[in-house]
Image: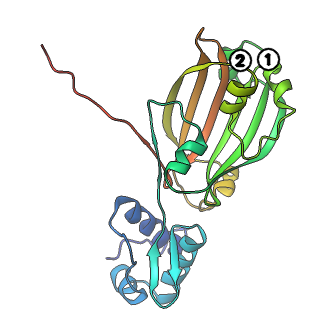
């Protein structure tokens, strides 16, 4: 299998690593990874190339080395079932993983056009946070709020806390429903760095835009989140309507 371009500007070990990652996500590799020799024969590359590719995936948490046993697939995608307004903590805990959230930035910002259309003000309160599962970065979230809500959020430590819980339990807001769109994007260099993705290769991420409203359909939170496409899945149950 000689599917790698040695004249490509992307280093060969990154090409091999990207291929391995994709095959793992497809389910082609589960459990123990083939030996170094087997991968060398399969990909027609050197031992050094295989080792660098495997080391990179191990550093990113896709693979893990078990002393005396070999290298095993460790990546496990988080599954969010659409249809329920669940918190990140609920979703990750149900997967048997440890959730955490790190606050990166908070403050008043000029409203982007889509945010202006929602809240109708030129300034809004923004928070930027990094969500992790078992200490692996999964999502970069940007949340926007009306200034009145933002002033109240100033008194809260937004690390390791659900904003839904703050809005409902502390601020008395009854969150009713969310309108969400999901699309594929190419992450920026900064987003790749925060999510620990390959910095010098093209890769896709998932962009989720979610508007949360109350019973009167008043907007309370608008969130734009960038998800690692290799670590997160959005799932939905579909039922076929039968003709009467």
Disc 2 packing (10 Å; few <14; some 14–19; many ≥20): some
Position of 110 with respect to 196 (left or right) is: right
- Above-or-below relation of 157 to 216: below
Residue lying farthest to the left in this orientation: 244
Question: Which one is in front, 100 or 190?
Answer: 100
Q: Could you tell me which quadrant the C terminus lies in?
A: top left
Question: Which one is in front, 103 or 167?
Answer: 167
Q: Where is residue 142 shown, x and y percent of the image?
A: 69, 36
Residue 122, labelled with which disc?
1
Position of 78 with respect to 133 (left or right) is: left
Q: Where is residue 10 shown, x and y percent of the image?
A: 55, 68
Question: Which one is in front, 38 or 143?
Answer: 143
Mark 2 or mark 1: whose residue is earlier in sequence? 2
Determine the residue positioned at 74% across, 24% down. 145
Determine the residue positioned at 55% across, 80% down. 52
Are circles 2 and 1 on residues that touch, CB within 8 Å? yes
Residue under pointer 2: 116
């Amino acid at each position: 299998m000689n599917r790698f371009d040695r004249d490509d500007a992307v280093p060969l070990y990154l090409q091999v690593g990207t291929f391995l990652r994709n095959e793992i996500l497809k389910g082609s590799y589960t459990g123990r990874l083939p030996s170094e020799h087997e991968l060398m024969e399969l990909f027609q590359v050197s031992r050094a190339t295989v080792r660098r590719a495997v080391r990179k995936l191990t550093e990113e948490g896709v693979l893990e080395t078990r002393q005396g046993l070999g290298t095993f697939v460790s990546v496990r995608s988080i599954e969010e079932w659409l249809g329920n307004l669940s918190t990140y903590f609920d979703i990750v805990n149900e997967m048997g993983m440890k959730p955490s959230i790190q606050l990166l930035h908070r403050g008043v910002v000029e409203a982007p056009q889509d945010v202006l259309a929602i809240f109708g003000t030129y300034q809004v309160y923004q928070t930027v946070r990094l969500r992790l599962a078992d200490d692996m970065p999964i999502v970069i979230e940007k949340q926007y709020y009306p200034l009145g809500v933002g002033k109240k959020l100033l008194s809260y430590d937004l690390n390791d806390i659900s904003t839904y819980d703050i809005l409902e339990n502390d601020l008395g807001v009854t969150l009713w429903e969310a309108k969400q769109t999901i699309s594929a994007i190419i992450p920026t260099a900064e987003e790749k760095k925060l999510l620990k993705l390959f910095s010098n290769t093209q890769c896709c991420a998932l962009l989720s835009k979610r508007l949360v409203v109350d019973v009167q359909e008043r907007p309370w939170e608008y969130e734009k989140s960038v998800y690692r496409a290799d670590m997160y899945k959005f799932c939905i149950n579909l039922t076929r309507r039968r003709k009467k």
